[in-house]
Amino acid sequence: MDFDLIKDAVTLLEEFNLSNKNSAYPSTIEGFKLWIFDQESQKHDDQDINTDWEGKDQGRSPESAISTLLVHLNRYAKSYSKSAISDSEFSTQEDFIYLINLKALGAMSKIDLIKKNIHEKPVGTLIINRLLNKGWIEQTDSVDDKRIKLINITQKGLEILENQMSKIRKATKIVSGNLTHLEKMELIRILNKLDQFHHPIYHKNIDSKNLIETVYNDFSFENN
């Protein structure tokens, strides 16, 4: 039995008893749990107060800071990707990202591959045509639907990708910077949450002139 844990629990119960003299919480296990929850929430509130960003003192919103930082991080990542392919046959970072997706996920339709990379159809088509011309990918008929062409990575594509993977892996490590493992896990959780919010909106193909107002009103951002 972990007696240190028992002592810590007793100490916590004593703190609960002292701070609950006005009976703000029920003197039950549920009241104790609620008190602990509120204590932890207060810690997060304190952290919010201590979190700083450029322009905060001038009234700049956290949403503005988040948007700018995401743009900056995307540009930093692109600069490292550009370095990773500087001495290779790749024209752009999109070339190797398309190949990585095909290697990891297997054959898929042209439109699915384009959507996977969050590209407009004309841009994605140019990338796919470039990879086809280089012989790094190939098109085959779908077994289920002959009208659909499936894109797959070729042996040549696998080889060209593997030749550059050492630098690509180094670039991805640099992008995550000095984050600890726990911070990386938390960042993945948060970015996944954002991606799950934006992904279905993106694929609704809402006209650009209506996009902001449609999303803003649909999700009632006025109340957030």
Image (tube, grey):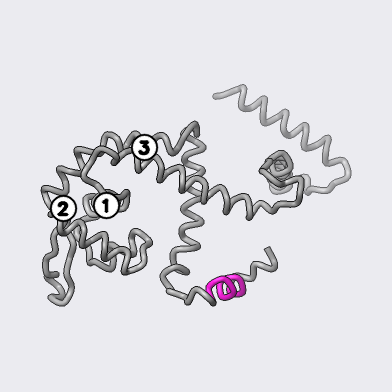
Contact between labelled residues 2 and 1, with CB atoms less than 8 Å apart: yes
The residue that appears at 21% across and 50% down in the rendered structure is 103
Residue 117 in the image, given as x and y percentages of width and height: 34, 58
- The amino acid type, in three-letter code, at marker 1 is Asp
Task: Estimate the spatial distance between the alpha carbons at disc 1 and disc 2, rounded to whole Å.
Answer: 10 Å
Residue 118 in the image, given as x and y percentages of width and height: 38, 61
Q: Secondary structure at mark 1?
A: helix
Contact between labelled residues 3 and 2, with CB atoms less than 8 Å apart: no
Q: Earlier in the sequence, mark 2 or mark 3?
A: 2
Which label belongs to residue 95?
1
Q: Secondary structure at mark 2?
A: loop
Mark 3, other Cα within 10 Å: few <14 / some 14–19 / many ≥20: many
Is residue 136 in the magenta section?
no
Residue 95 in the image, given as x and y percentages of width and height: 27, 52
Query: Which contiguous range is marked in magenta?
Result: 210-218
Q: Earlier in the sequence, mark 1 or mark 2?
A: 1
The residue that appears at 44% across and 68% down in the rendered structure is 202
User: Is 83 located above or below residue 26 in the figure?
Assistant: above
Residue closest to the eye, 177 or 77: 77
Residue that protrudes farthest toward the top in the picture: 3
Residue closest to the eye, 85 or 178: 85
Task: Estimate the spatial distance between the alpha carbons at disc 1 and disc 3, rounded to whole Å.
Answer: 15 Å
Residue closest to the eye, 153 or 123: 123
The residue that appears at 26% across and 66% down in the rendered structure is 125
- The amino acid type, in three-letter code, at marker 3 is Ala
Task: Kindly identify which residue carries mark 3.
Answer: 171
- From the viewer's perspective, is 2 left or right of 117? right
Task: Kindly identify which residue carries mark 2.
Answer: 136
- The amino acid type, in three-letter code, at marker 2 is Trp
Name the quadrant of the N terminus. Answer: top right
Contact between labelled residues 3 and 1, with CB atoms less than 8 Å apart: no
